[in-house]
Image (cartoon, rainbow, N blue to C red):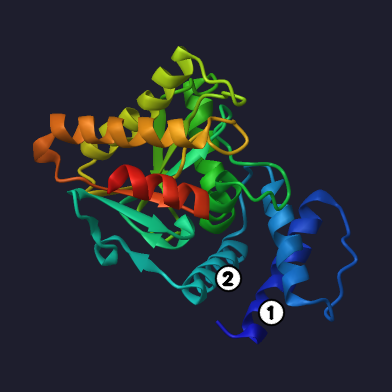
Amino acid sequence: MTEKRKRELLLSLIPALCDERGVELGLGEDAATDELFSAFRALVNTRPPIPADSGWLAMQDELLRGMITDAGVTHVEDIPPVAADPRLRLWRGDITTLTADAIVNAANSQMLGCWAPGHHCIDNAIHTFAGVQLRAECARIMDAQGHEEPTGLAKITPAYNLPSRHVIHTVGPIAQGRPTARHRLQLAQCYRSCLDLAAKGGLRSVAFCCISTGIFGFPQVEAAQIAVRTVREWLDAHEGSGVTVVFNVFGDVDEAIYGSLLS
């Protein structure tokens, strides 16, 4: 996507978002493109799950898909399998640029995405680049359910503008640095719930983020141990599923932890 087209789209999308809420941001056409996108992201992060005009959605979709393409898309089949277990793969990168049958989102119990403007959590990134359609679909699911999502369970939605086909949303335990036996069981259940949904839907590849290790405070080493052990146990028990599992990491520490566990 050209810089000119990106700016054109942002300068059309932002005023419409402001008009919805009767606010003014004071950004002119001379604002930097990064500043415009930050404003757009903040507005969609805080936008309630209400209908959007089809023309606006078309512009949003063009913007997000163009940005993802520019960032570079990675295909699961291009990630080398782990030598010790060809069912598993380790990949460091931005999960919103990964082509898989499903990527896993570490959600909160509302299941509506992160509402903090520009927050750097995976929930925020996935909802931002999937588009406002994702929050609307999650709201529909939660309205039908009638209560918050319990820890350890999962829901599946389309991925909209993401290169993956689906997003599987799961609520991890809030450990705050001191996981209990219950937290450990709940974290393992997150992985099983996601894989059960994938198998039920006939999906062949699932990319897991590091569930609960961000603001939920589950210690990284123990969380990774639970993740790898649970996934291997599930795959052993479902030999005919044909599911390939990608452990997605974003930083040096998690990459080293998973690299050691998978070697």
- Asked if residue 205 lies left or right of residue 97, the reply is left
**Residue 120, visible in the rendered structure:** yes
- Asked if residue 199 lies left or right of residue 96, the reply is left
Q: Residue at x 57, y 31 (%)?
A: 108
Q: CA distance from mark 2 to mark 1?
A: 10 Å
Q: Say which label, 2 or 1, has the lower sequence index.
A: 1
Amino acid type at image mark 1: Glu
Q: Residue at x 72, y 46 (%)?
A: 46
Number of labels in the image equals 2
Q: Position of residue 159 (x, y in %)?
A: 43, 52
Q: Residues within 10 Å of mark 1 (few under 14, many from 20)?
A: some
Numbered tag placed on residue 63 in the rendering:
2
Amino acid type at image mark 2: Leu
**Residue 208, visible in the rendered structure:** no
Q: Quadrant of residue 58?
A: bottom right
Q: Position of residue 112 (x, y in %)?
A: 58, 37
Quarter of the image with the N terminus is bottom right
Q: Position of residue 85 (x, y in %)?
A: 18, 47
Q: Nearer the viewer, residue 176 or 204?
A: 176
Q: Position of residue 61 (x, y in %)?
A: 53, 65
Numbered tag placed on residue 242 in the rendering:
none
| Residue designated by label 1 | 8
